Amino acid sequence: MVAFGITALYVLLPLGIVVFVESSSIIRKVRPVILCYIAGILIGNSSLLPEGSFQVLDVISTVTVALSLPLMLISLDLSHWRELTGRAGLSMVFAFIAIMTSSALCFLLFGPRISESSKIAGLLVGVYTGGTPNMAALQQALQVNTESYLAVHTADILVGGVYLLFLLTVGRRIIRKLLPPYRDTYAEGREIEPLSLKALQAMLTEKAGLSVLASLGTALLIVALGGAFSLLFAGEASTVAAILGITSIAIAVAFIPGIRNLPHSFKIGEYVILVFCAAVGSMADFSRLLTTIPSVLGYVTAALGISIVIHLLMCRIFRVDADTMIITSTSAIYSPPFVSAVAISLNNRNLIFPGITTGIIGYAAGNYLGVILARLLSLL
């Protein structure tokens, strides 16, 4: 019953926020995705949730990620994929260079005061090019002790949460002033209309019923097939395999006009993303800061901060636009599941596909880059 109650709360929370947003002309300027993330943080760091809620939230976030990817991808016209990925690939290379450079610099700054500092640098490269699965895999590959790993992981949750909130709020405005504006020759379907109560009501009408069921049924089938594909792999590799499988199948299905033209797929996916943001926000437990080694927190903060600055500078030099920089920074630092939420905040759906694509490249490259840097720094 507790799990059911928590699930119901997070499923209905976005609906309440959408209604709340439309109740005020001032609040209406704030996108629901931002408010869901903030609401999740407030709930998670209060005493409202019962003990053991973290496991339920973890399941909710996993399910919503799996379901949102196909719902959003099947609605995209990917016939112009080359136009949508070129700059993103360049920006992702810059992100790789940035985190490798910043991790090496922080090793020189913090190394003498932290044990296993070269290995921690490797962990940071892994997590900020591919995501948590890479960091977990690198713990095993580099033989990082549990205490160091947990300290880095906790610091990453805290620092990464702050940067994500920055991107979803004022960050995009600041970066858009520093980098060229987003332009492309293919602008069809670029803008994302904010999720509204009217849009949600439209999905509940008898006329829309069949198309909504068709969208959900297609997404569930894709998730099931992607999940079956992941069973061929063991451990953390299964997570990467599941995302690869779901993404690949959804991309293939998006080329079928009858499915791509289902009218409500993207909006359903957007609502699912709101549930995801609320759940992830609630998992960011700021009380963990008290148990994190201060020097490790400084290490992680400096590594991420310096890498973002380097990424920005390289994008400015090579004229990469602001939206592409933001989406590739998201796919590198947070992994593909967060791309849709940030694309929605940017009001640019064209970036979902290149963001997920570059994020998958990050999954593939993260372990290699992490091991290489850790081995090189251990020689110093």
Image (spheres, rainbow, N blue to C red):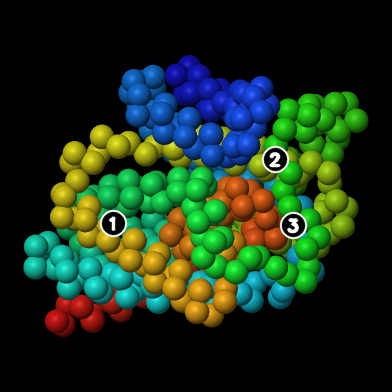
Q: Crowdedness of circle 3 by 10 Å Cα count: few (<14), some, many (20+)?
A: some
Residue nearer the viewer, 278 or 209 = 278
Q: Which mark is residue 171?
A: none
- Asked if 126 appears above or below 100 in the picture, the reply is above
Q: Distance between the residues labelled 2 and 1?
A: 33 Å
Work out whether residue 182 can be spotted: yes
Residue on which the image places disc 3: 190
Query: The residue tagged with tag 3: helix, strand or loop?
Result: loop
Name the residue nearer the viewer: 204 or 136.
204
Can residue 142 be seen at all in this image of the molecule? no
Q: Residue at x 63, y 48 (%)?
A: 344
**Closer-to-camera residue (65/47):** 47
Q: In which quarter of the image is the C terminus?
A: bottom left
Mark found first going from the N terminus, 3 or 1: 3
Q: Position of residue 183 (x, y in %)?
A: 70, 68
Q: Which residue matches tag 2?
A: 194
At mark 2, the secondary structure is loop
Residue 94 placement (x, y as % from top left): 46, 75
Task: Give residue 149's quadrant in the image.
Answer: bottom left
Q: Which amino acid does label 3 sit on?
A: Arg
Q: How crowded is mark 1: few (under 14 residues within 10 Å), some or many (20 or more)?
A: some
Q: What element carries label 1?
A: helix
Image position, residue 184 (x, y; %): 73, 70
* Distance between the alpha carbons at the discs numbered 3 and 1: 34 Å
Locate residue 162, reporting x and y percent. Answer: 38, 47
Residue drawn at x 73%, y 28% as measured from the top left: 197
Q: Is residue 160 above or below residue 16?
A: below
Which residue sits at x=39%, y=19%?
48
Relative to 119, 132 lies left or right: right
| Alpha-carbon span between mark 2 and mark 3 | 13 Å
Q: Mark 1 points at which residue?
A: 301
